[in-house]
Image (cartoon, rainbow, N blue to C red):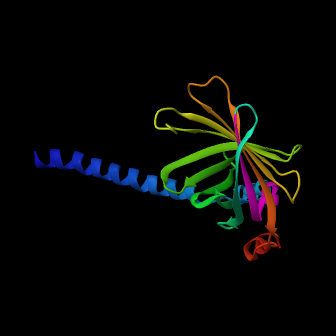
């Protein structure tokens, strides 16, 4: 009787052990970056090189009739991070008449070889929500176009958003933001960010030089 109960228990324990070991090895295999993936990421991120550097920015907030409600000064600081597979964008803008009224947010951009899309993740000061967008780069127009959804943006409604990063020149990129709430029938262009270079971009980082050297 004892043997009859002990053997099935031993078999179950062995099965659980083998499943756990298998999951560990599978996770390790999935997490390991492939050389081809890294190369793919680098090649696609190279399209965004014109953004790198420090910029003065004009945040133009637009009304539905096309008029500009207010222009707020700000900054864009764009740099390579995480072995040059991400761009980190640090941004700030404030009311010109009252600098104590300011807004900050971080954006991290990379390319996902699996989905074959760029992924943008936004982190905002004084707001715990994280927003993710994905999109594609149009080599003909030199534009990165992303779309996303902000859940309960105003506490009641979801907000559909999209951004266009126009990189047609190295001296004056522009970011155009569109928005549509879930109860609205059409989107609106509500923000245009015009950049002016305040510092020249650095040459290839030491990490990037080693990878491309």
Q: Is residue 105 left or right of residue 25?
A: right
Looking at the image, the residue that sits furthest to the left is 1
The region drawn magenta spans 46-63
Q: Which quadrant holds residue 63? A: top right
The correct choice, above or below, for 9 with respect to 100 in the image is above
Left or right placement of residue 154 versus residue 86 in this view: left
Q: Nearer the viewer, residue 59 or 186?
A: 59
**Would residue 118 be found to the left or right of residue 128 on screen?**
right
Q: Residue at x 25, y 51 (%)?
A: 10
Where in the figure is residue 138, as x and y percent of width and height?
Answer: 83, 43
- Position of 188 relative to 86 (above/below): above
Q: Is residue 127 left or right of residue 146?
A: left
Q: Residue furthest front?
A: 97
At x 56% / y 54%, what residue is drawn?
123
Q: Is residue 85 visible?
A: no
Q: Position of residue 68 (x, y in %)?
A: 74, 42
| Residue 88 picture location, percent across and down | 66, 61
Question: x%, y% of residue 172?
Answer: 84, 56
User: Which residue lies most toward the top here?
Assistant: 185
Query: Does the magenta-highlighted stretch encompass residue 212?
Result: no
- Can residue 164 be seen at all in this image of the molecule? yes
């Amino acid at each position: 009787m004892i043997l009859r109960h002990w053997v099935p228990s031993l078999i179950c324990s062995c099965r659980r052990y083998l499943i756990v070991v298998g999951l560990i090895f599978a996770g390790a295999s999935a997490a390991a970056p492939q050389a081809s993936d890294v190369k793919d990421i680098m090649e696609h991120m190279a399209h965004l090189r014109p953004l790198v550097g420090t910029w003065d920015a004009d945040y133009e907030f637009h009304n539905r009739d096309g008029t500009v409600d207010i222009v707020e000064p700000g900054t864009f600081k764009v740099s390579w991070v995480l072995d040059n597979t991400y761009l980190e964008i640090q941004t700030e803008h404030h009311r010109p008449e009252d600098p104590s009224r300011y807004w900050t947010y971080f954006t991290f951009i990379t390319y996902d070889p699996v989905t074959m899309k760029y992924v943008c993740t936004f982190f905002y000061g004084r707001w715990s929500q994280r927003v993710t967008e994905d999109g594609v780069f149009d080599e003909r127009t030199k534009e990165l176009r992303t779309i996303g959804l902000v859940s309960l943006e105003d506490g009641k409604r979801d907000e559909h958003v999209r951004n266009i990063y126009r990189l047609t020149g190295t001296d004056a990129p522009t970011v155009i933001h569109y928005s549509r709430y879930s109860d609205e029938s059409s989107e609106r262009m509500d923000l245009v960010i015009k950049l002016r270079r305040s510092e020249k971009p650095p040459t290839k980082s030491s990490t990037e030089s080693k990878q491309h050297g």
